[in-house]
Each structure stands twice: as structure tokens, then as C-alpha cells.
Image (cartoon, rainbow, N blue to C red):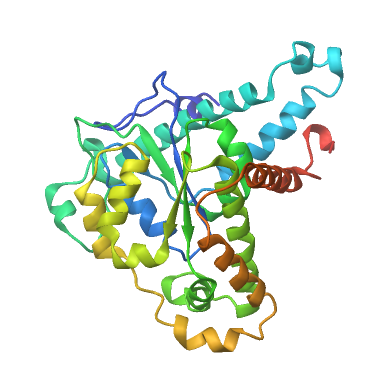
Amino acid sequence: MLNTLSSCRLLFAPGSSRMTTSPPRPVFIIGAPRSGTSVMTWALGQHPDIQPMPETAWIAAEAVASLQSFRLGSERGEFSHLSNVRFPFDAFLEHKGRAIDAVVHDAFARRLMDKYGDEGRPSADQLADPEFLHIRLDPDHPKTRWVDGAPINTFYTWALARMFPDAQFLFHLRAPQGVIASLEKFDVAGGVATEHEAAVAIWTEHVRAAWNTERALGPDRVFRVDFDRLQSDPEALMGDICAFLNEPSCSECVAFLNRRLNSSGTHETDIRDTLGALAGFKEAAALYDAITATRTETAEGREAGEQYIQKRFESLSADRPLLGGRS
């Protein structure tokens, strides 16, 4: 046990982020898989103030656990710890967010040590090699923010927005036929090939949740990334994203996009005619048209979006076992 505990010390590599008293400001990339989410994660990770994260699931799991533990701590009114003092749920979630932020920074420091040794940073030769992904570090600009591009976070935005009140979201939107074609060929990229019908459901589920997040949180917290623009004008798009994030523009982010962006939409026009009779595709196409037709939202739309993402999160948190097998 002592060896285990001693191995859990905090590690901070040269130039890496440190825990601070300032509120965490993560960036979550939401939307359907195969919409440029991974390449954007790594492109933003070249920014001197943003660290890239491998796709996570544990942060979404922590959001679910936070809701469950708060309910457990409040279930008996004055006889429960949290409800006895009327502890606010949003404040509870913010504490959880700060704890997650500390773990993320510690994990990043450990990752740098594992990848680059005691120096904790790539060499000039490594950075010059375009065939490998490297984390750019600037000693004068520690990476105080992080970007998580795991598509699963799309369904947990109601809680994430409260765990991290200063978080911002990038909503990646790609036409359904492009995602379907890319998922069909995903095995070529090391993933699992997906049949058309399942791919339609994946697109619709993710995009509906991401759009409602955009409606609920508004333009100050959600920026829509059009896949067509990502391919056609990555430099201008990255400039707009950096401005949205209130970060300086980053030439290395643009250079990474130019090197790595995979034009995987080559099958879009080839398969579009074959999708018309596919179950769910007309609904998906109509949803895409509705989203692209509007950039502003009414008060009623914001309320509807808020209700949708809250219900979606709560549905994913239901019927999960708690301590002692309780549910």
C-alpha cells in the first residue's frame, strides 16, 4: 500500500501546466465522430496554452457519478450531509470540475515524462518530423487549458457546462452522408467499420444533442465548426476559433491542420443516392438542413435546448447502481 501511495505523487514536467486557483477553462469538442473532431483536438494541442487529451470517457463518467453522489448525499433531507446545509448542486459540480482539472494536468505531466523522458518536451528533430504527432511546448506559455475531443461528451454537456462554468464547446457539424461514408470505411483508419443504418443513428443522436447544446448555451460558449469550411479554409477557421476561445492566433495549429486533415469526404456524392431509402436518413438530412439554416436562437429555442440536454443527461444517469448496490 505504501508503494502504491508513493507512486501517486504529482508530477509537473518543465513547461507543463500547474494547478492554479483560476477556474478551469477546458474546451470540449462535440458532434458526430468522423467530423474532424480528432484532428481539431491535436491541432489545438499545438497551441501554447492548450494541451491535447486522448479521447476520454472517464470525465463523462464522473459527471454521472457526481449526480448520483449528490442525490445520495441529499436523499434524507435534514438527516443527509448535503441537504442538511442546503448545499447547492451547481457548487457541488464546480468542486468536482476543479478536481478533474487537477487530475488532467497531472496526467499530462506524466504523459510528457513517459513520451519525452526527464526533459518532458520533444526535441527539435522530433518537432520537425511531420510523420509524428508531438505536443508543442513553450516554456513561456504553460498549457493552462485542455481540449477533449471525445464524442461521448456530446451527451453529457448539461453537467459538463456546470462542472466547468468557463468551459467552451466546439460543435463539429458534417453532412450526414459524409459521416456515414467515413464510418463505413473507418476500419481503414484503425477503427470499426459501421453499416449505413447504424451510422445514420450515430450521426442523428450525436448531432441532435450537440445542436441542443448550442441552442441552450448560446454563441458565447458554443462555436459551430462547419466541416466543409474546415476542409476548404482551415487557416481562417482556426483564426475564428482562437478568437472565440480568446486565445492568440496560432500558426502551428494551422500548419498541423494543413498537414493532417484527411479529406475523407470523397464518398459523399457517390453514396448519397443510395441513402434515400435508408431508414432514418431523410430525418437526418432534414435535421442537417434545419441546423444549417439558422445561427441564432429564440428564448423558446434556448429553453427547449436546455430541457433536451438536461433530460438526455438524466436519462443516461438513471438506473445506475450506487454504493451498496442501491439505485
Residue 214 is situated, as x and y percent measured from the top left of the image, at 55, 48
Q: Considering depth in this image, is 250 or 288 the residue closer to the camera?
A: 288
Looking at the image, can residue 75 be seen? yes
Q: Is 143 placed above or below 302 here?
A: above
Residue 298 is situated, as x and y percent measured from the top left of the image, at 60, 45
Quarter of the view holding residue 144: top left
Residue positioned 21% across, 50% down in the render: 252
Query: Could you tell me which quadrant the C terminus lies in?
Result: top right
Residue positioned 29% across, 60% down in the render: 234
Q: Is 175 placed above or below 268 here?
A: above
Furthest residue to the front?
298
Q: How many marks?
A: 0
Residue 36 is situated, as x and y percent measured from the top left of the image, at 41, 62
Looking at the image, can residue 32 be seen? no
Residue positioned 39% across, 21% down in the render: 20
168 on left or right of 299:
left
302 on left or right of 70:
left
Q: Considering depth in this image, is 187 or 257 the residue closer to the camera?
A: 257
Query: Could you tell me which quadrant the N terminus lies in?
Result: top right
52 on left or right of 288:
left
Quarter of the view holding residue 227: bottom left
Q: Considering depth in this image, is 214 or 163 the residue closer to the camera?
A: 214
